[in-house]
Image (cartoon, grey):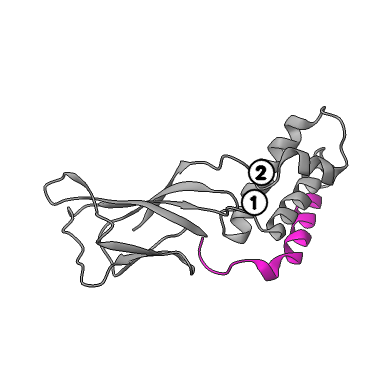
Amino acid sequence: MAGIVLVTAPAIEPVSLVEAKLHLRVDSRDDDSLISSQIKAASERARQYFRRENSQSTWDQTFDEWEEYLVLRKKPIISVTSVTYVDPDGAPQTLATSVWEVTINREPGLVRRKFNQTWPAVRSHEDAITIRYVAGYAVVPELQKAYVKLLVALLYEFREPTITGTIQAKIEDLEAAFSGERMVGAV
């Protein structure tokens, strides 16, 4: 079973504080802290909803054994930094790039053996193989930025207690508007 761990969080969110404040038509600095936290929350919701990393982050994904294709769960893949494994004697090893290649021009991203190469023997235990990779966009698509801005606007407008279900209904309406762009399949 493959596990996945965030190594390096995104350095920037898909929407800046300035962009969000322009969208909200807020001129003062009084709510900067609040709006910044709402940007983070909206960005996380966008990652979950679209099933895509909207900002670049580094991940370690583990596998118990070699497979024909090692499927990388985060999307889109920018690069694979390393493939490491634990050999039968329990020593950590880095697999040479001459043995593997990555497919990033389609989704999901895959790590596979190069032609005429074989996977090395690994110790028989969980998480024997680790692939470190960077996922996210170099330039966030405008559609995802729009989603984040609209969600921030909802969170900002409904930050006080309201009738139960109001904010959830509005978020469902927002997500219905973007449903055609949602990626299907497992996260």
Q: Which residue is mark 2?
A: 41
Q: Which residues are magenta?
A: 165-187
Q: Is residue 50 magenta?
A: no
Q: Which residue is mark 1?
A: 45
Residue 96 horizontal/vertical position (percent): 24, 54
Q: Residue at x 42, y 60 (%)?
A: 72
Q: Residues within 10 Å of mark 2 (few under 14, many from 20)?
A: some
Q: Say what amino acid the circle numbered 2 marks.
A: Ala
Residue 42 horizontal/vertical position (percent): 68, 47
Residue 171 horizontal/vertical position (percent): 75, 55
How many tags in the picture?
2
**171 lies left or right of 78:** right
**123 lies left or right of 168:** left
Q: Residue at x 61, y 41 (%)?
A: 12
User: Magenta part mainly helix, strand or loop?
Assistant: helix
Q: Is residue 180 magenta?
A: yes
**Marks 1,2: beta carbons within 8 A:** yes
The residue tagged with tag 1: helix, strand or loop?
Answer: helix
**136 lies left or right of 2:** right
Q: Any mark on residue 37, and which?
A: none
Q: Is residue 75 above or below residue 22?
A: below
Q: Residue at x 83, y 43 (%)?
A: 22
Q: Say what amino acid the circle numbered 1 marks.
A: Arg
